[in-house]
């Protein structure tokens, strides 16, 4: 990864917001594949080329551009597009430099649009976001990851916070089952207050 310039970032388990872009992409692909697949969903893999081509040839909501054009420097030719019977190919000695320049301009436009969109999303998110903070030894309940039915317990615990990794991530330990230690994010925590006897 170092040789090809990839930075490996770790994500928090059971916290899809960490990988928001991928989760959004997966959601889009899942719904498209489900629509095209047969009733038993056994041929989903046969639909992948069509779904991928569809995704790559439509305007992306965030970049406002077509991924195919950003990759190849031209618009895709779709089955329903009118095509001339005679096609003439011209040789342009400047073609490569013009193509690189065009692709660079598309990339810069996309970056600017993405930055604007991110600022807008962040502002909207921050407006409706509480910013809870917990200290070591605070008692909390943790959202249950296994609730499947209406009457299943939603939270388990009590847990004690034993370490603060970041502002949003904590290590917690179950009060009674002390071998149960979890890494969780603040959106999975519910504060627990001890009742004091008077």
Image (cartoon, rainbow, N blue to C red):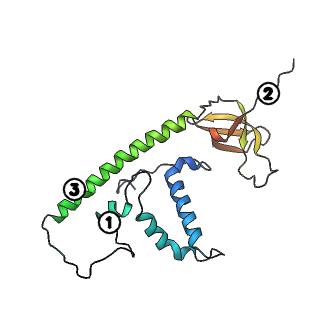
Q: Which residue: 46% across, 40% down? A: 120
Q: Which numbered circle lies on residue 194?
A: 2
24, 172: nearer the viewer: 24
Per the image, label 3 sits on a secondary structure element best described as helix
For label 1, the crowd category at 10 Å Cα-Cα, with few meaning under 14, some 14 to 19 and many 20 or more, is: few
| Residue picked out by circle 1 | 75
Left of 150 or right of it: where is 77? left
On the image, the x and y values in percent for residue 170 come to 62, 38
Between marks 3 and 2 in the image, the one whose residue lies nearer the viewer = 3
Left of 156 or right of it: where is 163? left
Marks 3 and 2 in Cβ contact (< 8 Å) = no
174, 75: nearer the viewer: 75
Image height check: is 6 above or below 117? below
Per the image, label 1 sits on a secondary structure element best described as loop
Q: CA distance from mark 3 to mark 2?
A: 64 Å
On the image, the x and y values in percent for residue 69 come to 33, 62
Ranked by sequence position, the earlier of labels 3 and 2 is: 3
Ranked by sequence position, the earlier of labels 1 and 2 is: 1
Left of 189 or right of it: where is 47? left
Q: Which residue: 27% across, 78% down? A: 84
For label 2, the crowd category at 10 Å Cα-Cα, with few meaning under 14, some 14 to 19 and many 20 or more, is: few
Residue 132 picture quarter: top right
The N terminus: image quadrant? bottom left
Q: CA distance from mark 1 to mark 2?
A: 63 Å
| Residue picked out by circle 3 | 101
Between marks 1 and 3 in the image, the one whose residue lies nearer the viewer = 1
For label 3, the crowd category at 10 Å Cα-Cα, with few meaning under 14, some 14 to 19 and many 20 or more, is: few
Image height check: is 88 above or below 136? below
Q: CA distance from mark 1 to mark 3?
A: 16 Å
Residue 57 picture quarter: bottom left
């Amino acid at each position: 990864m170092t040789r090809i310039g990839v930075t490996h970032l770790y994500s928090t388990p059971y916290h899809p917001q960490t990988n928001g872009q991928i989760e959004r992409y997966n959601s889009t692909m899942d719904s498209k594949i489900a629509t095209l697949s047969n009733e038993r969903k056994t041929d989903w893999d046969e639909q992948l080329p069509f779904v991928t081509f569809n995704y790559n040839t439509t305007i992306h909501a965030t970049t406002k551009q077509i991924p195919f054009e950003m990759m190849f420097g031209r618009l895709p030719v779709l089955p329903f597009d009118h095509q001339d019977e005679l096609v003439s190919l011209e040789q342009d000695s400047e073609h490569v430099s013009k193509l690189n320049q065009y692709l660079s301009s598309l990339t810069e436009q996309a970056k600017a649009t993405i930055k604007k969109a991110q600022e807008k999303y962040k502002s909207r998110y921050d407006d409706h976001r509480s910013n809870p903070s917990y200290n070591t030894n605070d008692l909390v309940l943790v959202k249950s990851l296994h609730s499947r039915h209406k009457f299943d317990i939603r939270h388990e615990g009590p847990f004690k916070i034993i370490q603060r990794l970041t502002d949003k991530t904590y290590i917690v330990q179950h009060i009674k089952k002390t071998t149960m230690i979890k890494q969780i994010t603040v959106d999975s925590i519910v504060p627990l207050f001890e009742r004091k006897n008077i």
